[in-house]
Image: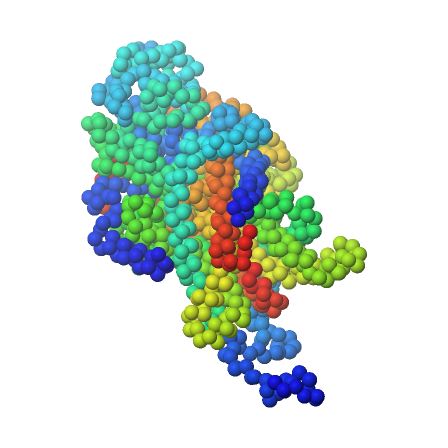
Amino acid sequence: MSASILDPTGITAANVAVAPTLPDIMPPVKARKGFFGFMRQNPAIAVGGSLVTLMVLVAIFAPLLFTTDPTALAPALRTREPSAMYWFGSDMLGRDIYSRVLYGARVSLLVGFSVAVFASIIGLTIGMISGFVRWADSIIMRVMDGMMSIPPILLAIALMALTRGSVQNVILAITVAEIPRVSRLVRGVVLSLREQPYVDAAVAAGTRTPVIIWRHILPNTLAPITVQATYICASAMIVESILSFIGAGTPPTIPSWGNIMAEGRALWQVKPYIVFFPAIFLSITVLAVNLLGDGLRDALDPRMAKRI
Amino acid sequence: MDRRNFLKATAGVAALTGTTGVSAPALSQGAAARTLRFVPQANLANFDPIWGTQYVVRNAAALVWDTLYGFDDKLEPKRQMVESEEVSSDGKVWTFKLREGLMWHDGTKVTAADCVASLARWAVRDGMGQMIRTIQEELVAVDDRTFRWRLKTPYPKMLLALGKNNTPMAFMMPERLAKTDPFQQINEYIGSGPMRFVRNEWVPGAKAVFSKFEQYVPRNEPPSWLAGGKRINVDRIEWIIMPDPATASAALMNGEIDWWETPLTDLIPSLRRNRNIRVDIADPLGNIGAFRFNHLHAPFNDVRARRAVAMVLNQEDYMRAVVGDDKALWQTLPSFFTPGTPLYTEAGGDVLKGPRNVEAARALLRESGYNGQPITLLVGQDQAPLKAMGEVTNALLRSIGMNVDFVATDWGTVGQRRASKSLPGQGGWHIFHTWHAGADCINPASYLALRAHGDGAWFGWPKDDAVEAARDKWFVAPDVAAEKAAVAEMNTAAMRHLTYAPTGFYKTYQAWRSNVTGVVGAPIPFFWGVSKS
Amino acid sequence: MFAYIVRRVLATIPVMAFVALFVFSLLYVAPGDPAAVIAGDQATPDDVERIRASLGLDRPFLIRFGEWVWRILQGDLGVSIFTNLPVSTMIQQRIEPTMSLMIITLILAVSVAIPMGVVAAWKQGTVIDRTVMGFAVLGFSVPVFVVGYVLAYVFALELDWVPVQGYTPIKQGLWPWFRNLILPSIALGTVYIALIARITRATMLEVLQQDYIRTARAKGAGQRNILFLHALKNAAVPIVTVIGIGIALLIGGAVVTESVFAIPGLGRLTVDAILRRDYPVIQGVVLLFSFVYVLVNLFIDLLYTILDPRIRY
């Protein structure tokens, strides 16, 4: 390369070797703007979010959607096929499955969201403490490891067996089973963030720990926690259905998708609609929540995909 | 080796074993025909029929242990292990002589000493046995095949007590086993019945295996329930526990099991349509659904509150909920006793008959002083009939204006809580459901649930002297007419007092493959006389 | 390295101790009475009390806990309240079906999911990617028992290709053993496949962007070579992590699968024991599961050192 007065480094457009164009592994990404642009760019969030919203609306407005009392028994009209009178058919006690499924959305969604929120909050707290208070870290992590090593379903069943079937107890049992994972996640984030230079700088500048947590650590945990929360919500809804399947779930006087399926499971070969309709609703909702989680993860930070 | 070669090798082995039959199941085609695979009503978790009184334990025990007497299909006790018996003229001394050739599964002979020890253990746990113990003078073996029971007063129902099929049955065990405390389990399962229990193949909760005891000497008469000759025509019986009714149904249709004790009623039509399956009533004596009150605490300590419930209790709702729409299976029951039996009576049962009267019930409930307190309703979710009954009750109570605290839990917890005499708000209860096998409700003999002697009575602790007086009359009734009168009196008294409320009488089906013959409808699934081709 | 192994093994002790205490206390405060269930419906309240006493259920907590721990350390897991059999015998009887189910599911899931994830990553953004990932998410979303029922109905009942239920021990033949496990493994594996496929895809995507891939491509390496030799090996660590975490999921799912397909395994044993309050069995089995989980994770941590030479302890 020839240096010259005008260009001391000697690099000119003429004499720089042009790198060969390599085939792109990632296709080019078009930037889009606005709400609808955001939605088109993140189809997972769009689809997932709208389905979840739809389910929530169905749950809230269930009484207005041509439903009857979901607990009204009519043993004389049991196990009728879907018809004009019973849109989704009637179950073994003559109750209208359509009404039960729509009201069941309330319970299943409530369980899912509650578990996600409580597990996230409690897990966040524990993870923070664990990340910052060193002497507590090893004890807490041993306890969390211990709890994680008990298969979550068994833990939930055992906790349910301690008490009677009710929605609150189901939420409690599943939350306890999910806390360890969240706390581990938060702890991991906190530990890695603590090494970051800006946190060092803040500490050196004398910032108090609570302010550090609030200003630096917490915002960075929000993204992974939110994504994790959606997965927890989806998983909690499935766990609720499994608990009901085993017979350790919500009481039959309160319909949930899980216990409608559990009651109908013995008859599914002859009256498949009893299991079929709640299964469809559950699967769609869980799918939607999972999609939402995926979309959020990809939008917020694709690198999270390796960890969650 | 790397993954690819490993997969090839496995595929090769699988193909080889598949085609040449090298890996065929241990049982050849012929042997398979000599094994009967049965799906019982519940899990066989333990196996002491004196210690644990569940029906499924008794049913399995009937294969392994034998009894001195046994009910035939007319519910009359007939000799089984006994060759002859003698009663003294004053009715106080019973002498029994055993048959020849009775052997235990370990090769030793059955002796009178074994029977004496077995009866002693049984009598501690059984209601009628306890009655006999209180009037017992001595129970001794006279010689190897004879033993004597000397009583202070006559006990005319002795043979009924020894031959009844209600738990606990008077099974005969070797002396060393019978010496086990009646409140502890036995450790060996040696009996003198027609099948051996194959202990090392027992997987509690999954499978129990019985094999034919070649040295069993059946009686000469044709088999009739627990009486007659118990001839086994298969080599092996496997009890397979299947928790999922849909799976059991599919297995039966596919020929993977041979006999299913308790198919769900709703699955019966599809089983019937299958040409290889036969369906019939499992037990002609059926079952009586029970709505059990707690007589110790308000509001159900007042007979008016109980009556109010009985006035709106719609047995049709309960029965449909429990067994479905097949009217051949259920009937309403204004009685505490089993329909179709000699002593059946509907005396006094009017409160359960006729159209239901909600308004009158509400008024009566108010009159009894019900103050709106929540009614603790214990419902075991893991037993389908109880779960169904619990939900119907929930609707019933609400229809007469009661508040319900629906405790959805499992049968084990119900079992514990119902034993509590505390206030319902503090761990007690108001109502739970159960059912009684019709065989237990034929007469007052073993009808624990109908006793009304207060503190010592069954859970709920009803107290009514008229019921107890009628029961006493039955025990000393000299003939059938007197027995009928006593039972009618007991029914009337119990209906007036509402010791519990029957929710109806129902039967269930059993289903088996068409290549299995000899299956009879009885309170216990009997395997003698059953063949498989 | 050796020191690391020793440290890790020692670290498992407090974890196991916590699990032991937790499990034992949990059941101690539980309502529900095994004595009541054993006594049966025809028993009187007095009978139930006598049975409780004979089972030793009326002694104080610390005494029972201490005795229990002492016996565990000697290898004695106690005796089941219901069946009078030693818990270790009961576990032994049931371990083969559950292990068989889990191993087959594991092999199936890994062999299906990893290629799925690789293909999806390779064809990222295309219809193939979306379809594959769509199936994967579906696997997460449908409850295991629904999948099980549908599979049993179609393949066993209607088509009669495999039996509907049951388990054939391996000593009765490899093929019959496998035949019984095909449907349960597929049912149980759907969730696992979904999980592994997603992580594989995500990790592969990240790896495929790395410089060394670009170098390999520049060197003229074939697509398959790149994907498997270079990319997958480097993606191995997170994938293996997820496989390890997924074992806990498998155990949970096995409970349902064993129920639907009438497989006499540990999952069913545990659920039955929990619902019956058979304390010794519950304690023994949960301890066993935890121990296995801890061991598996230790093994995976060690596997990291093989997969990624940069990781050294």
- Quadrant, the N terminus of chain A: bottom right
What residue do we see at 42% from left, 19% from top? B131
What residue do we see at 48% from left, 31% from top? C74
- Quadrant, the C terminus of chain A: bottom right
Residue A79 lies, with reference to residue B191, above or below; the image says below
Count of picture labels: 0
Residue A119 lies, with reference to residue C233, above or below; the image says above
What residue do we see at 62% from left, 78% from top? A32
Q: Quadrant of residue A19?
A: bottom right
Image-based side of A231 in relation to B1, left or right:
right
Residue A126 appears at what percent x and percent y? 66, 50
Residue B199 appears at what percent x and percent y? 33, 33
Residue C100 appears at what percent x and percent y? 38, 49
Q: Nearer the viewer, residue A22 or C139?
A: A22
Residue B119 seen by the camera: no
Q: Nearer the viewer, residue B196 or B334?
A: B196
Image-based side of A119 in relation to C114, left or right:
right
Q: Nearer the viewer, residue B90 or C162?
A: C162
Image-based side of B227 in relation to B441, left or right:
left
Image-based side of B18 in relation to C32, left or right:
left
Residue C224 seen by the camera: yes
Residue A94 appears at what percent x and percent y? 47, 53
Check the image and tell me how it is coloured: rainbow
What residue do we see at 50% from left, 54% from top? C305
Query: Most extreme residue toward the right, as rendered?
Result: A206
Q: Nearer the viewer, residue B1 or B425?
A: B1
